[in-house]
Amino acid sequence: MKVLIIGLGSIAKKHIDALEEINPELMIYAYRSMPNSSVYKDVVNLNSFQEVKSYKFDFCIISSPTFKHEHDLKLLVDLKIPLFIEKPLSHNLDIKYLVKALKDSGIKTYVACNLRFLESLQFLKKYLADIDKLKINEVNVYCGSYLPDWRADTDFKSTYSANAEMGGGAHLDLIHELDYIYWFFGKPYNVHRVLRSTSSLNISAVDYANYTLEYDNFVTKVSLNYFRRDSKRSFEILLADKTIELNLLRNEVHIDGDLVFSCNQVALDTYKAQMEYFIENISSETFNDISEAFDVLSICLEK
């Protein structure tokens, strides 16, 4: 099996590590924009798209900076190979025409939101399958952490996360939260959003995002930020007769204060589980294809 990677940053390296754990015999190639780009492990660098077209790849991982996704997807349409696209799908909604082109072409797509493979979230999704949605009164989602701590030995202001023109922003980096709410409850009928970049971080990208998602019988509040020093990531569901709290950092679920689920899985494990899922389903329907991801992006950005 031959795999092409576009964009060889930190996320791509996590995908490569996952691939090598799954199948050490895989041949991995990276399309690089610079002729003298560094080599990672046994990955073979390809320096022109002409070179890329000379190989027959089984699938491609797009893990370039978000603002380059549209360009990269346009390049790849003609190769007609399955696409594993790192979230978010794009930094704007101009990509809609490509979503249609890829769907019409029959190319298999999967947009990578690895939190769908967090075992506590999977436990809760199964638990809620037996719950009457009419019993849900309120849902609260929170994700806050400190951007300067994200990448060691790197000036955070130089990263794409801090720069709006590079597709950065808490609303896009932390789109996982909107994605799993869409996965659990579907598309809301109305969305109110507040996007701001006025914190002490002093960056051009959105550093605070707040969403109110309206469903038929309940409202979901989602709050995301880059400036919380004591990281917190939580998912709370208030039912008519109980309160469910999921701590995503600890991979634990509590109901009315009692621990009902915990596991030793760490976030890094979700990359392998996600890649296994994609490879196993590469010739069939996958969840979170490009159309679903566009729905989530619309919730995130649409005015």
Image (cartoon, helix red, strand yellow):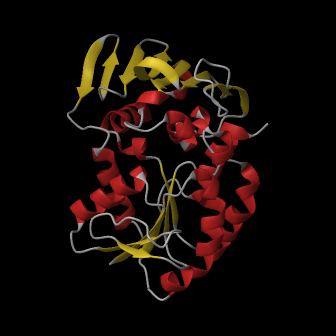
Quarter residue 75 falls in: bottom right
Residue with the most extreme right position? 303
Quarter residue 124 falls in: top left
Task: State the residue in front, 19 or 44.
Answer: 44
Left of 57 or right of it: where is 95? Answer: right
- Taking 260 as reference, is 57 above or below it? below
Residue at left offset 53%, top offset 20%: 140
Q: Report the quarter where the C terminus lies.
A: top right
Q: Report the quarter where the N terminus lies.
A: bottom left
Left of 206 or right of it: where is 156? Answer: left
Residue with the most extreme front position? 36
Q: How many marks?
A: 0
- Taking 98 as reference, is 274 above or below it? above
- Taking 244 as reference, is 195 above or below it? below
Residue 45 in view: yes
Residue at left offset 72%, top offset 34%: 189
Measuring from the top left, give residue 287's x and y in whole percent: 48, 55
Measuring from the top left, give residue 168's x and y in whole percent: 60, 41
Measuring from the top left, give residue 274's x and y in whole percent: 36, 53
Residue 177 in view: no
Task: State the residue in front, 248 or 47.
Answer: 47
Task: State the residue in front, 54 or 267.
Answer: 54
Measuring from the top left, give residue 296's x and y in whole percent: 62, 44
Residue at left offset 52%, top offset 58%: 64
Residue with the most extreme bottom position? 54
Left of 212 or right of it: where is 24? Answer: left
Residue at left offset 41%, top offset 46%: 114
